[in-house]
């Protein structure tokens, strides 16, 4: 055995070059630079602006609000599509196949994927780029995974603001993928034009799916993995869902939700789903419902943003922080009730 010599660092070091490199690395682009980059389609500028939107730093929030305000006149020009489904239904595979179909027809596609955060470690895998290997390499596509965090309202606000930035960057289609669990579907439904529910046959959840309120929100149901031995079960599930949809009240949009089959793995039925979405957009644009829906969504998000800001101000207040710790100790010692403690803490904000 013999020991190999290690790499010996150079004794000649250009300190001036190191200083310039560090200064450049520390320099943060101004709001003007980011805005100019976004409107010219620069992905780096778009990514940096989204990072500001997702940050909890007050300085970053101020810069983000300035950029969003300036981007508003360039927004509202895309088709916003929400996609949801239980874990394992094939959302990422479907989005990749759907995204590739759109980019091949000349569309620019932005995918905003909301990944669930662990309630224990607070971390997220953010693995959507790994699962969409082909789409991530497409120059006409942009994929941005974001952690859901602890607050659904918070991630929904950030996703909505990110949508505005992506529209200003020139993306024609914005796809928002939900975590597939909890109430995130409701939040995503309130920020998109078209809501697509992915289902899979043969898992025994057909009737359970019909009972869930999410069916009422869906503008279409796509039964994925309709290939091979599962094709017959998928056709049967399509009949059941079609029967069930006729039992629901008519939508305000005047649109009758459709049920279709697809196989994202084999790229089958993807083109018909896009044709259906185009028909929906034409229908709701001609009767004025699309404009009305977006106005209603803006009002809803005004109220949601107020709630989120009040909550953030409450928990970041130093006086509340100190009193909250004391009340938690009293609750642990059975010296007060949660309701009395909450009333006391809220009374502090009045002063």
Image: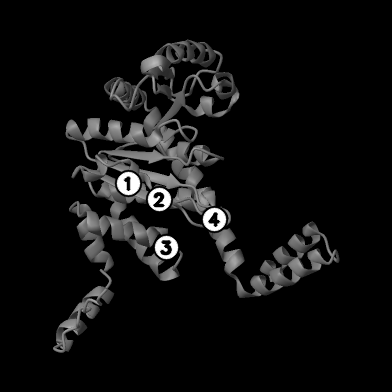
Q: Is residue 180 left or right of residue 145?
A: right
Tell us which disc is closer to us: 3 or 4: 3
**Residue 161 visible (yes or no):** yes
Q: Mark 4 falls on what kind of element?
A: helix
Q: What's the CA distance linking mark 1 and mark 4?
A: 29 Å
Examine the image and state in which quarter residue 294 appears: top left
Residue plotted at (51% across, 12% down): 240
Q: Are marks 2 and 3 in contact (CB under 8 Å)?
A: no
Marks 3 and 1, the one that precedes in the sequence:
3
Front-most of residues 26 and 17? 17
Q: Which residue is mark 2?
A: 126
**Image coordinates for residue 196, horizontal then vertical, percent:** 41, 29
Contact between labelled residues 2 and 1, with CB atoms less than 8 Å apart: yes
Instruction: Point out the residue furthest to the front here.
Output: 1
Q: How far across and how far down the image is residue 259, in percent?
A: 42, 17
Crowd band around label 1 with a 10 angstrom C-alpha radius: few (<14), some (14–19), many (20+): some
**Element type at marker 3?**
loop
Q: Which residue is mark 1?
A: 129
Q: Residue 343's image quarter?
A: bottom right
């Amino acid at each position: 055995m013999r020991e190999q010599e290690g790499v010996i660092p150079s004794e000649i070091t250009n300190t001036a070059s190191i200083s310039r490199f560090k200064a450049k690395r520390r320099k943060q682009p101004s709001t003007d630079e980011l805005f100019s980059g976004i409107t010219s389609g620069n992905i780096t500028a778009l990514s940096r602006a989204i990072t500001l939107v997702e940050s909890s730093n007050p300085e970053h929030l101020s810069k983000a609000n300035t950029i969003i305000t300036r981007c508003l006149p360039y927004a509202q020009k895309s088709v916003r599509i929400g996609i949801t489904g239980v874990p394992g239904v094939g959302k990422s595979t479907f989005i990749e196949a759907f995204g590739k179909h759109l980019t091949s027809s000349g569309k620019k596609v932005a995918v905003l994927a909301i990944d669930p955060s662990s309630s224990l470690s607070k971390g997220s895998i953010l693995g959507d780029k790994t699962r969409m290997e082909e789409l991530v390499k497409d120059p006409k596509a942009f994929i941005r995974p974001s952690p859901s965090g602890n607050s659904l309202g918070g991630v929904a606000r950030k996703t909505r603001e990110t949508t505005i930035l992506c529209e200003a960057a020139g993306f024609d289609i914005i796809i928002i993928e939900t975590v597939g669990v909890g109430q995130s579907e409701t939040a995503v439904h309130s920020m998109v034009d078209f809501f697509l529910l992915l289902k899979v046959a043969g898992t025994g959840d057909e009737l359970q799916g019909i009972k869930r309120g999410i069916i009422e929100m869906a503008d279409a149901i796509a039964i994925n993995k309709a290939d091979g031995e599962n094709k017959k079960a998928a056709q049967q599930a399509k009949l059941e869902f079609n029967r069930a949809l006729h039992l629901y009240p008519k939508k305000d949009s005047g649109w009758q939700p459709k049920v279709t089959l697809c196989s994202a793995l084999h790229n089958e039925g993807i083109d018909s789903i896009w044709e259906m979405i185009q028909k929906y957009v034409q229908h709701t644009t001609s009767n004025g419902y699309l404009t009305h829906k977006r106005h209603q969504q803006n009002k809803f998000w005004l109220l949601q943003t107020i709630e989120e800001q009040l909550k953030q101000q409450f928990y970041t207040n130093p006086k509340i922080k100190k009193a909250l710790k004391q009340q938690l100790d009293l609750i642990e010692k059975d010296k007060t009730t949660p309701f009395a403690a909450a009333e006391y803490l809220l009374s502090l904000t009045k002063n």
